């Protein structure tokens, strides 16, 4: 009965020796980089070879903007835009940053259209509010914030 533990110990030590064909049994070598990436200088990554495809926002612009406000906070500012949709049922509103050049941030007010056609309804029923937060570092150097809709745009100063 003592032969089995001794035989197991010999096999274990031979597998961890790192030499010959049994070197692949060494658990310390299982996660080492043996591919060509280390030779070519490229880092190992899970990203696709041709990179990620750019995601475009397919939501339409809201019909018009009726209000824009910038509320100061301790950590920066909150931009809040009120828009008027062409009909009831529009949802998932966001302010999408389009450009940030020469001290002006430009946002687009985008919403998702309803799946079914709904009645137009009153202005109060079609009103949508979207907002975003800007930190102090994001506000540094910004002189004007512009929010764009399909029919108009509004501008405010932080």
Image (cartoon, rainbow, N blue to C red):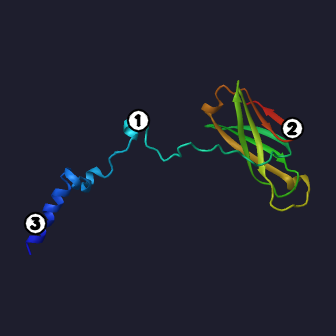
Write down the quadrant of residue 75 in the picture. top right
Q: CA distance from mark 2 to mark 3?
A: 84 Å
Q: Quick check: 23 left or right of 144?
A: left
Image quadrant occupied by the N terminus: bottom left
Q: From the viewer's side, name the closer residue of 6 and 122.
A: 6
Q: Is residue 43 left or right of residue 21?
A: right
Q: Nearer the viewer, mark 2 or mark 3?
A: 3
Where's residue 45, x and y in %? Answer: 46, 44
Identify which residue is drawn at 80% across, 33% down.
155
Single out the residue that lies furthest toward the front. 21
Estimate the x, y position of residue 6 in percent, counting from the top left.
Answer: 10, 66
Where residue 33 appears, as percent x and y from the top left, is 35, 45
Front residue (pair 67, 116): 116
On the image, numbered disc 2 is attached to which residue?
A: 152
Give the position of the C terminus as an image quadrant: top right
Is 115 on the left-hand or right-hand side of 21?
right
**Cβ–Cβ below 8 Å for labels 2 and 3?**
no
The label shown at residue 40 is 1
Q: Which residue is at 12% across, 71% downward?
A: 4
Q: What is the CA distance from the residue labelled 1 to the residue labelled 3?
A: 44 Å
Mark toward the start of the polypeptide (2 vs 3): 3
- At mark 1, the secondary structure is helix
Q: Residue at x 66, y 45 (%)?
A: 55
Residue at the bottom extreme? 1
Viewer-side residue, 110 vs 52: 52
Residue at label 3? 6
């Amino acid at each position: 009965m003592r032969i089995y533990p001794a035989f197991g110990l010999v096999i274990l030590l031979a597998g961890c020796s790192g030499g010959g064909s049994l070197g692949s049994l060494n658990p310390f070598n299982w996660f080492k980089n043996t591919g060509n990436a280390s030779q070519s200088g490229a880092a190992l990554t899970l990203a696709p070879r041709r990179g990620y495809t750019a995601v475009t926002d397919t939501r339409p612009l809201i019909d018009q903007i009726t209000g824009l406000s910038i509320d100061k906070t301790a950590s920066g500012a909150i931009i809040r835009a009120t828009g008027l949709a062409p009909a009831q049922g529009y949802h998932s509103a966001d302010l999408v940053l389009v450009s940030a050049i020469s001290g002006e941030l430009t946002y687009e007010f985008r919403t998702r259209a309803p799946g079914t056609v709904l009645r137009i309804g009153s202005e109060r029923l079609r009103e949508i509010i979207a907002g975003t937060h800007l930190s102090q570092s994001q506000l540094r150097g910004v002189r004007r914030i512009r929010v764009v809709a399909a029919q108009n745009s509004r501008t405010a100063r932080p």
